[in-house]
Amino acid sequence: MRRFALLLAAVLTAAATAQTPPPPLTLEQLYRAQPYRGEAAKEARFSHSGRYLAYLWNPHGEPGSDLYVHDTRSGQTQRVTSPAALAAFDGPEELERFERKRAQREQEWRDAQAREEAQQAYLRGAAVDLGQWDRATLERVKKDAADKKARLDAEKASEQREAEAEKRAMAELEARRAGKPLPTAPAASASSPASAASAASAASAPNAKDHPAEVKKDDWEWRDELKQYRTRNKLKPADLYPGVAQFVWAHEADELILQVRGNLLRWRPSAGLTPLLLNQRALRALAYTRDDRGFLYQDETRVLRARFEQAGSQLLNRELQHPDDAERKYRIDATTLSEDGRWMALLARAPLQAEEGKPAPKSGRQVEIADYSGRWTTTRKVDREVSDDKRKVPPLALYIRQVPQDGGLPARQSEPVFTHKGGDVWFEISPIAWTRDGSRYAFATWERERELLRVYLGSASETAKPEQVLERRGDVGHEVVNLLRPVFTPDGRSLVLVLDEAGWRQPYAIDVQSRQLRPLVSGAFEAHTVLGFTPDSRALFVLANRDDPAAMNLWRIELSSGAMQRLGVPGQYHRNATVSFDGRLAAAVAGDWIDKPELRLLQTARPDAAPRQLTQSHDPAWGDAVNRLRAERFSFKNRHGDTLQAYAFKPPGWRAGDRRPAVVYVYGGPLNDRHIVESDSFQGSGYLFNQYLALRHGYVSVAIDTRGHSNYGRRFSDANWEAPGQAQAEDLEDLHRELVAHWGVDGARVGLNGWSFGGFQTQYTLYTKPDLFAAGIAGAGPTEWENYNSWYSGRTLGKVDRSKPSLRRFSLLPLAAQLKKPLLLVHGMADPNVLYQDTVNVYRALLESGKDALVDLYLDPEGEHAMGGAVKPAGLHRKYEAFWLRTLGRAQP
């Protein structure tokens, strides 16, 4: 009976606990100082046999990226590197510093979280000591100052003793020379060794009364010391343990070479880690030699070869030599070796002529960014190239060279096989691709002003010029440019590259013999990431969003028929993917809003088999603590018949007939291979804060991908061309109508929020459709496109004229006078991407047009493009929360 009673009590307690609602979600909990999310695994690659999968990763909370190796046969994973494992190759002082800085970071996380929670408790009326953290830090500052004073006093006393001893020795020397009696030694004084040692001991005693080393300063002076101490001890990226930078597998053997802060180490399953080169220089492992008995590595621009059983290295890419009167003197910029190790392509550039004693000129200009942290304002300069800057592209040359044999004499330098004169042009060249047998190479070029895309194919020859095998002029699709990376099939018979021939970025193949181009897939989806091939060259592996526009999946494509087979879990987004050499296995960081993104191992021959999870990158408390609502995906047609993707959070108790306030998050600009509505993206405002608004305040909160985004085909990504903002504003108007009709939203209480391009889009919409949204928050928006980086603006917005700032025609300043509803402008004042002046100038235009009562300005004095200075994520969204409650009100009960 007693056992039954205990069991019954336990069941009733569990039931009561299960029925207890979780505590209300708070912003300081949602945006915790220590992130819930960890860093995902990266650089995953299989050994040649496919038995081992190596990747760089560290568990949640640990700094750096260590090397892990998973044995696909046994299912066991080995952590190859760690601070302890690398102790044999690093100095103890360096490892001690890393550990000290890690402890500092963790303490800063704890202090920041405690301060945030205490501040909110104080605002609720609790008796909270808000100065305790400053006092604790100030005690460390005072102790450091006292210790420093004690050291200086001891040094001064020691110098004084040495001076008195020297004076006494000289007096004795003079007395002996003069035959006079030696002077008597002085009595012990405060400066004697014994008394000095006693004083130094007292000065260093932490609890000594009347501390002789105490530094006397006024309170305001100590506040200055505290500020300087924090500035001095601010963590920098180089302070934390970095782990492994990169690694390369052997051609046949199951072993690899890894780089750790310039050192090269070798790992073998049977022998573990052994050193190869430990010189702390900027080394990078490139590849094993073809026979796996040596390796190639890079030192700055030099490529060298070493043998495991021999000492010394052989230089492979000797620097280029030129006659004294040569018009252009090229220097190696990059070296690409063929997989068989017999050939290399040298991409070289000729330095631009510079005035004597000055650095070589470069495109663009330098702009100043103000720093207000000191007593007086100072500035720093950052590079910026805008659309009306004259370009200074260095002349370029491509050399093809045979790799010298072991111990062989250097061959005479050949002439370049391809050149470009550079100058005031926009010219880009892809990386060089080699066939596996080293018999051919290929590359692509893009000339923006001429709208000219070309693909070249060359044979392994130091003298033969490459042949142009594809040309497209105009109508290329601007989002193709960053994807120009041709790659050969394993048999070398086809050259595969991503093109936008039919409005979607997809793989095409050029037959090496016939030069014929053919598509490898068809359909309305993006498939722009080529991962590899099966060894027989019959199938291709890609990432594509064929079955879900919000989720890139891993697909196998039959090259002969174009048939596609999905390999990953439907609906999950796959990133950092890789495929084994034999095509039997794949790995990717895959996940979604429910199953968090982790590195997973997939069997390509059994796509229905559950992937094996290899990492645990996130705090397990994340889901229960902050991810309490499920986002609901939806889509609708805009006025032009385009399908727009979105997701929304419905508040508890939502009904279709409600009249609730709503907030919409938008970006709306090209992102190369990204957009906002992605099934694994926990974006800070569009996802996390929108969830909070639904839970705490009963809002319907939405994130949408309007036209303008990437990964929806060229019709979407080109929507900004010559009319930035217009297509998005139309789509947002159609979304507003959709929300009112089907989502229980009060049309008079819908707010719009966006960051960066979304900050521009929010303003554009509020200025051009002033009655549509009730209020807006615009973060770090580029309002004057003539001031933005030309690599983006001249490619995605409209044609430019380098004789004048023609992109000014898209400025928001003339439109600002049309604002009718409240607008919060947010910006980091140290932003080197979208300059803070863009917000200042539109703010001025708003004030000049009498919008003083409508516009608010919220600034981070030290923040950059993602903020990160004085304004923390919790504080930023607390500002947002107050703004929305003031302008949109609360949901009805």
Image (cartoon, rainbow, N blue to C red):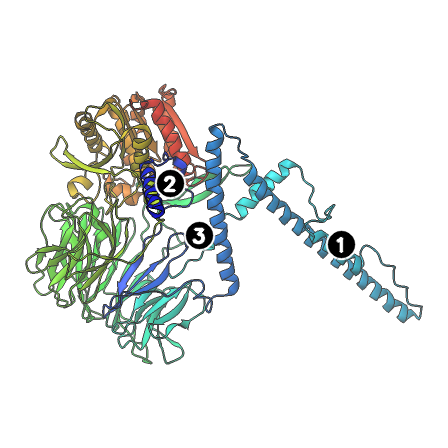
Residue at horizontal 81 percent and vertical 59 percent from the top: 192
Question: Along the horizontal axis of the image, is 174 left or right of 492?
Answer: right
Q: Quadrant of residue 327?
A: bottom left
On the image, the x and y values in percent for residue 618 come to 34, 50
On the image, the x and y values in percent for residue 841 come to 38, 29
Q: Quadrant of residue 45?
A: bottom left
- Which residue is at the far front? 1
- Packing grade of label 3 (10 A; few <14, some 14-19, many >=20) is few
Give the amino acid at mark 3. Pro
Question: Is label 1 in a helix, a strand or a loop?
Answer: helix
- Packing grade of label 2 (10 A; few <14, some 14-19, many >=20) is many
Q: Nearer the viewer, mark 2 or mark 3?
A: 3
Q: Quadrant of residue 806?
A: top left
Q: CA distance from mark 2 to mark 3?
A: 18 Å
On the image, the x and y values in percent for residue 173 come to 86, 69
Task: Determine which residue is flagged by label 3.
Answer: 237
Q: Is residue 746 above or below residue 600?
A: above
Task: Determine which residue is flagged by label 1.
Answer: 199
Question: Along the horizontal axis of the image, is 665 left or right of 283?
Answer: left
In depth, the one of 776 and 411 nearer the eye is: 776
On the image, the x and y values in percent for residue 121 come to 47, 32
Task: Determine which residue is flagged by label 2.
Answer: 865
Give the amino acid at mark 1. Ala
Q: Is residue 418 visible?
A: yes
Query: Tag on residue 40?
Result: none
CB contact under 8 Å: marks 1 and 2: no
Q: Which of the two discs, 2 and 3, labels the residue nearer the N terminus?
A: 3
